[in-house]
Image (cartoon, coloured by chain):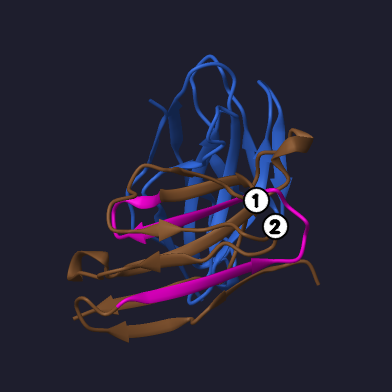
Chain colours: A blue, B brown
Amino acid sequence: GDSVTQMEGPVTLSEEAFLTINCTYTATGYPSLFWYVQYPGEGLQLLLKATKADDKGSNKGFEATYRKETTSFHLEKGSVQVSDSAVYFCALSDGGGDYKLSFGAGTTVTVRA
Amino acid sequence: EAQVTQNPRYLITVTGKKLTVTCSQNMNHEYMSWYRQDPGLGLRQIYYSMNVEVTDKGDVPEGYKVSRKEKRNFPLILESPSPNQTSLYFCASSPFRTGVYEQYFGPGTRLTVT
């Protein structure tokens, strides 16, 4: 079945540092890939997405590129802010009969001023 | 404002006392789903619905029921809650028929069963 593996946290960074969260996946076919973000006390928000190989999703300074050859979708941001402190989830949907999202375990990121 | 709403946001109950968590969306989405979030496990799908009167089990359906009598509503029912159902629950909806598979999530319901 589908699965997503993302780097374990927690991750603690200083403001303006570079952030990378690794995500790899196993899926049949050609899944759509997503990064969701959960700010403290809130629900999940879609951060960015990519629907086919070599697509780059971007939003709020975050980027991730769909790499089919390495089955990866790593999240990056060049200069983090305190407001980026959140839990980040990598997810995929293969558009199969249940259309479900398969999630990674989540990575907690804390940015210090 | 396009949104998914859930009620209640917080609930503490006792083992065996039936409860319902409501979910409503105003985006005319056909697809709706329930997930539970547990530390270290990410989110796991409980039940989903492709349309009115069409529901099916997800990965962890034991101990839960759902119904879909109207397009906008998708309540989650725990007939006899147990402590292992203590979790954070999210409802989501998706315009999946457009070929867009992303899902839009509600704010979550934190359930504690003692």
- Check residue B43 for magenta coloring: yes
Residue receiving disc 1: B52
Residue A75 sits above or below residue B10 on the image = above
Q: Give the range drawn in magenta.
A: B18-44
Give me the residue at 55% from left, 43% from top: A75
Is A48 in front, or is B51? B51
Q: Where is residue A51 in the image (x, y as percent from the top left)?
A: 68, 30
Main secondary structure of the magenta stretch: strand
| Contact check, label 2 and label 1, Cβ < 8 Å | yes
Q: How crowded is mark 1: few (under 14 residues within 10 Å), some or many (20 or more)?
A: some
Q: The residue under label 1 is which amino acid type?
A: Val
Helix or strand or loop: what does disc 2 sit on? loop
Is B55 in front, or is A64? B55
Chain under disc 1: B
Is B55 in front, or is B61? B55
On screen, residue A40 versus residue A3, left or right, reads: right
Q: Where is residue B114 in the image (x, y as percent from the top left)?
A: 18, 81
Q: Quadrant of residue A109?
A: bottom left
Q: The residue under label 2 is which amino acid type?
A: Lys
Q: Is residue A79 visible?
A: no
Question: In the image, which disc is placed on residue B71?
Answer: 2
Q: In which quarter of the image is residue B106?
A: bottom right
Helix or strand or loop: what does disc 1 sit on? loop
Q: Can residue B1 be seen in this view?
A: yes
Q: Position of residue B37 (x, y in %)?
A: 38, 59
